[in-house]
Amino acid sequence: MKTIRCSHCNSETPIVQNQPTVCLLCGHCLDVSTPIHLSGSEFCPRCGHPLETATDSSRLCEVCGWFGDQQEILSLPPRQEDFNAVLAVLQGLELFRDVCRKEQIIESHYDVGHINDRDFQRIRVCVRDARQSLVTLFTALRRRIPQILSEVNGFIMWPDGWTDRHFNVCNEPCDMLIGQCSCGTYHSEKEGWVQSTLQRHDAIIIHS
């Protein structure tokens, strides 16, 4: 007996001729006779938040409350003037989730013979390219997130990973970025060399 893999819980379900196929584990309806129409990822045209893929043409954004038709949605996130790390991560995760979901659906249809080998391999190449794009996205995202330095009682020690040590009035490098240093002076955040060092390491200071 032929089986199909559920796109929701990944369990195997037998296919019965002339009967609707329902997952025995989660109860999800698996209509293997329905043509495959896989759209791309969907984003809210107002706030850019990823949208859940629906079966009808209506779309609702759970973040800003936007409601509209499928023709109004965006296939790519809108460009934001101000970088929002949280939204960027959510968009990246939704893209990854979308790729995994589509790959699983394609494999289910391939298992029952609704997709030939040529189309199946073409889709797998698309999935591989999408995975590589996600790696590029997260790498670029990591470069946009600044390093956070927390000030404790007005002091910030020189970070361990920063090898470009600062020398002030002696041969020994400074041990403090902000505060009373071993060189005998008090370093302030307003000093030019401190600001240039923060920019060089893409770091910001959080005051307690």
Image (cartoon, rainbow, N blue to C red):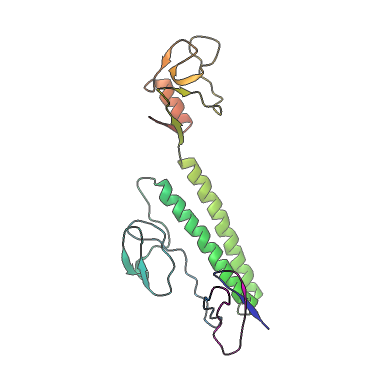
Magenta stretch bounds: 10-26
Above or below residue 109? Residue 80 is above
Q: Residue at x 46, y 51 (%)?
A: 89
Q: Position of residue 143 (x, y in %)?
A: 49, 41
Q: Quadrant of residue 161?
A: top right
Above or below residue 185? Residue 80 is below
Instruction: Tell me if residue 12 is in the magenta stretch.
Output: yes
Q: Position of residue 71 (x, y in %)?
A: 36, 70
In front here: 76 or 34? 34
Q: Position of residue 169 (x, y in %)?
A: 49, 9
Main secondary structure of the magenta stretch: loop
Q: Residue at x 52, y 9 (%)?
A: 170
Say how many tags the image has: 0
Drawn side of residue 19 relative to residue 204, left or right: right
Q: Residue at x 57, y 69 (%)?
A: 9
Q: Position of residue 206 (x, y in %)?
A: 40, 32
Image quadrant in which the C terminus is located: top left
